Amino acid sequence: MITGAGRGIGKIIAEQFIADGAIVYVNDLQEPNVEGAKPIAFDVTDSAALKAGLMQVYKAEGRIDCIVNNAAIIQNQKLGMVTKQLLEKMYAVNVFAVIDIIQIASRLMARTGGGCFVNMASITGVVGSPGQVAYSSTKGAVITITKSAAKELAPLNIRVNAVAPGIVKTERFEELYEATGDKINERIEKIALGRLGTPQDIANAVSFLASDRASYISGQILGVDGCATI
């Protein structure tokens, strides 16, 4: 199951999993339209709805092998403009929901011999970013959640990893940055591979971490950033 799969990176991840031959459930606030996937709508910040949604998948399939915690919100604000209301909103989706999902789904995975989680972190959670104190702090939290959960769930044969994308050209990217071409060009110049990432770049990494090829990999934060953080 991929959360936040209505568009952008989440939708491309779902399409990649379908191409891999998986039975895929896609989640968003409204039922996502992803060909070949089974839509399931609920708000990840609603614990009761979240639990009901996961149980719906578990009862239908008899197991949950992998969950991609992709749902997130981003709102850029300078440090002096960050409000408690904004922090609470972003942490509810980007952090608290991730813990909630891991708590509930790991119990179900343990019944059937294990599984895996792939969490969506960010380059901003690794190196920080001016104007993104709130967002980068939520993604830093996702990184530490990933590492701690991986250690705790390893005895249950449950792997927990994260992907930390750099700048990825999605619809959301265009909404946030298209109007600041010169600044974006400056940031692209700092990317060693010389280009923005694509949603498919991220989907490829998530697909790998969810597969048997990564069966001995857990607690890792895989940077998919064009060599921007070295």
Image: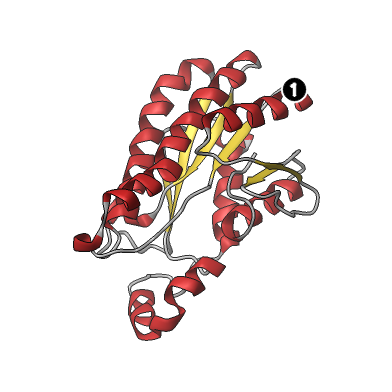
Q: Relative to 121, does residue 181 appear above or below in the rendering?
A: below
From the viewer's perspective, tell me whether residue 21 is left or right of residue 137. right
What residue appears at the point 36 percent right and 41 percent down from the top-left corner? 143
Q: Residues within 10 Å of mark 1 (few under 14, many from 20)?
A: few
Question: Which residue appears at 53% of the width and 35% of the height?
Answer: 46
Q: Disc 1 marks which amino acid?
A: Lys
Picture quadrant where residue 184 is located: bottom left
User: As drawn, is 20 to the left or to the right of 150?
Assistant: right
**49 or 119: nearer the viewer:** 49
Q: Is residue 167 above or below residue 127?
A: below
Residue assigned mark 1: 59
- Residue 67 pos. (x, y %): 59, 36
Q: Is residue 76 visible?
A: yes
Quadrant where the image shows the C terminus: bottom left
**Image point 43% across, 45% down: which residue?**
94
From what the image shows, is residue 108 above or below residue 165?
Answer: above
Q: Name the residue at 30% across, 53% down.
A: 134
Q: Secondary structure at mark 1?
A: helix
Residue 218, horizontal then vertical, whole percent? 46, 32
Residue 75 versus residue 156: which sits nearer the camera?
75
**Occupied quadrant, residue 65:** top right
Give above or below for 112 relative to 10: above
Q: Can residue 196 be seen here?
A: no
Q: Residue pushed farthest bottom?
A: 182
